[in-house]
Amino acid sequence: MRILIVHNQLWAHYKAIIFNELQKIVTSKNNDELLVIQLASIEKSRLNLGNLDTTIHQYPYELIHDGVLEEVGLVQKIKGIIKSIKTFKPDIVNLTGYYDVASWVVLFYCRLKGIKMVLSNESTQGDHSREQHKELIKSLIIRQFDGYFNFGTLSKNYLISLGGKPEKMLVNRNCVDNEALKKIYDSYYPQRNTIQQKIGTAKHNFIFVGRLIEFKNLFKFLEAFKNTSPKPDWGIIILGDGELKPKLQQYAVEKNIPNVQFLKGVSWQEVPQYLAISDVLVLPSYSEPWGLVVNEAMACGLPVLVSEKCGCAIDLVQNEKNGYTFSPSDTEELSNLMQKCMENPTHLQEMGKKSKQIIASYSPQNVAQEMYEGFLAVYNN
């Protein structure tokens, strides 16, 4: 079985660890082979998050464009992918997404050549407003695939609503490198008080990690914190960069919101340092295909407050056990949950332990095994 995966960017370390594990499985089998086509080195929005580390990629890959993803033209994509297909001669091609013309051309080409197709899908019903004519086109495209890898239950349900058959839903989870993150976190946690004093944070913190852009819903996050009853030993850490950063900083000053620290975005290896000085992760997004930062926080043993519009919410958050879900448009609901967290720090520790238990099965090894078994099912069908 020869497997070719088309992926967007080499920078995505969380995909690299899955592909590494998949390669281990493939090499342990007779006559199986894996190749990953990377369209570009990095997305423009990731350029400030550290240098690209190619040493983490321990699987065979080809790079179409050694630069920014947004610079890759349609013709360059199509030619690069089809050239690799002709050379590698895969039995199965796994496409990451179905949203551009290049994917449609590759799908049509593979269908003509009798190559089986698997779709990796991030979308959910609620991550964008949906127009009927566009949904019809998507439905026609999606039905052409032989199997589907989804980012969780909401992602799976969306494809089923578009006509994907339930029995073809082969993977329904997403992951990060739990063990690596926990190891880094554990190295920083004993220094928690020292790091807090150095940065100037409160003793206890809610933390947001990600890009500071509109759909992350950060103004409501700040407003919700302001509306809690005063707790002088609690604060907020906003870790990341983006177009809204100056406006968010101005808003925090104008509204006199105490103990808010805006820190620059960092690479994934540095995130556990900031999780180590925090107590609860908050992801308040209006829209989120999955939300890998929730995986990261749970691997480090933090409870989580996650918007119900995030793809991971239904799979990773067990209300009252390891955190809470909430409506991103309901500031009062989020404020009440934050208040609840501040008033019961002992319960936070118990919820953090539950987070670790839940996230343990969302490992690169398990996801890679599910992917391999999915490819095998498609190949043998």
Image: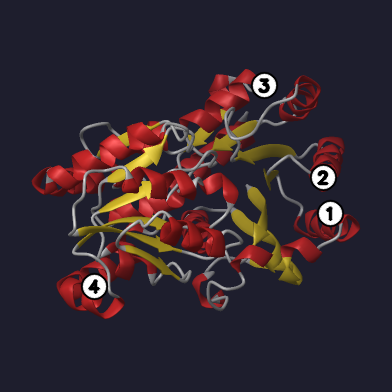
Closer to the N terminus: mark 3 or mark 1? 1
Amino acid type shown at disc 1: Ile
Per the image, label 1 sits on a secondary structure element best described as helix
> In the drawing, what numbered circle is on residue 82?
1
Look at the picture and state if 191 lies above or below 110.
below
Circle 2 Cα neighbour tier, 10 Å, few/some/many (<14 / 14–19 / ≥20): many
Amino acid type shown at disc 4: Gln
User: What coloring was used for the rendering?
Assistant: secondary structure
Q: Which residue is mark 4?
A: 196
Circle 1 Cα neighbour tier, 10 Å, few/some/many (<14 / 14–19 / ≥20): some
Labelled pair 2, 1 in contact (Cβ < 8 Å) = yes
Amino acid type shown at disc 3: Leu
Look at the picture and state if 56 lies above or below 172.
below
Q: Which residue is mark 3?
A: 162
Q: Nearer the viewer, residue 239 or 222?
A: 222
- Distance from disc 2 to disc 1, alpha carbons, whole Å, reads 7 Å
| Left or right: 66 in relation to 289 | right
Q: Which residue is mark 2?
A: 106
Q: Nearer the viewer, residue 143 or 348?
A: 348
| Left or right: 251 in relation to 144 | left
Q: Quadrant of residue 159?
A: top right
- Distance from disc 4 to disc 1, alpha carbons, whole Å, reads 52 Å
Q: Quadrant of residue 130?
A: top right
> In the drawing, what numbered circle is on residue 224?
none
State which mark lies toward you, 3 or 1: 3
- Distance from disc 3 to disc 1, alpha carbons, whole Å, reads 27 Å
Amino acid type shown at disc 2: Val
